[in-house]
Amino acid sequence: MSDTKKNIGVVLMNLGGPTSEDNIKIFLYNLFRDPDIIRLGGGFWQDKLAKLISTIRAKKIVENYQEINYCTKGCTGSKYCFNRQNKVVSTCCSPINGLTELQRRSLEKYFKQNVPEHNFKVYTAMRYWLPFADQVMNEIREDGMDHVVLLPLYPQFSWTTSGSSFRDWEDVKKEHKAWKKKVDWQEFIVKDYYLNDDFLHAMNDRINEALERFSPEDRDKVHLVFTAHGTPLIEVESGDPYTRQINETVEAVMKLRGRDKQYWLGFQSRVGPQKWTQPNTEDLVFRLIRYGIKHMVMIPVAFVTDHIETSMELNIELREAIEEENLHIEGLEVMPGLNDHPLFIKALADETLKIMSNVLDAEHTAASEETARTLVAS
């Protein structure tokens, strides 16, 4: 088997998040400069708008990141994080950094334990903050990977998330080729996995964890409120499958549960004047409370790591908004993120092995045939 052992790099692609107050503005600038997020085609005006929005928004959200700071005792992020390199304890670090690193390590450990016949190494490429695709590509080349699997930490596909990461990866590859850098590995892309059975079971486990926080007598009263990052309607109308896949994920989870509870779906994080997918999560929750529903579990159905949209928007700001509306709710719990749930890690591994099945099966077949020839010859 030593002759058939392959070096396989798996690149977890995620949004990224600021790791200190100093880089919040840079993170936001990178985000709004992306033409897949705001459709201005890149260039001069995109750059101008990104600078304006990042300057305005950075001042407003510093306190948010401080409130959900994940690295209170030291850096939990990747080796590329400045806090880790400088041995600094951050006061303003997004949870997405440390949790994505936890997912990376967990997946790599899974491969070593369950697929020892190949050398798997897992990397992280963030879209808007460190580590960037350029850094990861250099590392993959230095490590001598034969195959590379691009694996987004977005279960549902959207051109604004997975699509943007794929495009950025291709742009960086073109730059590397222009500088005569070798990027000749065989590449595979996992587009989505929103109906992966282990992913759905992991979601179900996390929902049950949230339900356990209610008393037995209140548990029967709980409504499940699924929530996903919204998208401009122009994306939906242009054929982006994300919203449809979100709905399919919700229905698949509830089918798995035997449709044991009333459930709803909302969309959060609306930005700008465009029309977005409806209903807005906050508005939906207000409406449910006015209907007399007093017990809810908020279920982030598109986020697989806790970050500002879950830890801040759902767990803190939503509660504050309910209070400001003079509404009363007796029990509101936010489902824990999938993070390093064992079934979710298994789902990521299975999607990797599935997309590479032809290559791995061919290698297994070739090895078997070589063994048979050796036995015949002897």
Image (spheres, rainbow, N blue to C red):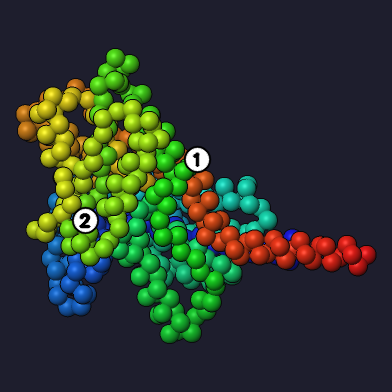
Marks 2/1 in contact by CB < 8 Å: the verdict is no
What residue do we see at 34% from left, 57% from top? 157
Tell me the residue that label 2 is attached to: 231
> x, y (%) of residue 305?
36, 46
Type of amino acid at the residue the image marks with label 1: Pro
Residue under pointer 1: 342
Q: Determine whether the residue tagged by mark 1 lies in a helix, strand or loop.
A: helix
Q: Nearer the viewer, residue 342 or 68?
A: 342
| Residue name at image x 9 percent, y 58 percent | 273
**In the rendering, which numbered label is found on residue 16?**
none
Q: Nearer the viewer, residue 111 or 234?
A: 234
Residue 7 as seen in the image, left or right of residue 89:
right
Number of numbered discs = 2
Cα–Cα span, label 2 and label 1 = 30 Å
> Label 2's element?
loop
Residue at image position (15%, 38%) is 284
- Please indicate, yes or no, whether residue 338 appears anywhere in the rendered image: yes
Question: In terms of depth relative to the viewer, which is nearer, 261 or 90?
Answer: 261
Residue at 11% from the left image edge and 34% from the top image edge? 287
Q: Quadrant of the N terminus?
A: bottom right
The one nearer the camera, 68 or 89, is 68
The residue carrying pointer 2 sits among few (fewer than 14), some (14 to 19) or many (20 or more) residues within 10 Å by Cα, namely many
Of the residues under marks 2 and 1, which one precedes in the sequence?
A: 2
The type of residue carrying mark 2 is Thr
Q: What residue occupies the far top of the structure in this picture?
A: 217
Q: Quadrant of the C terminus?
A: bottom right
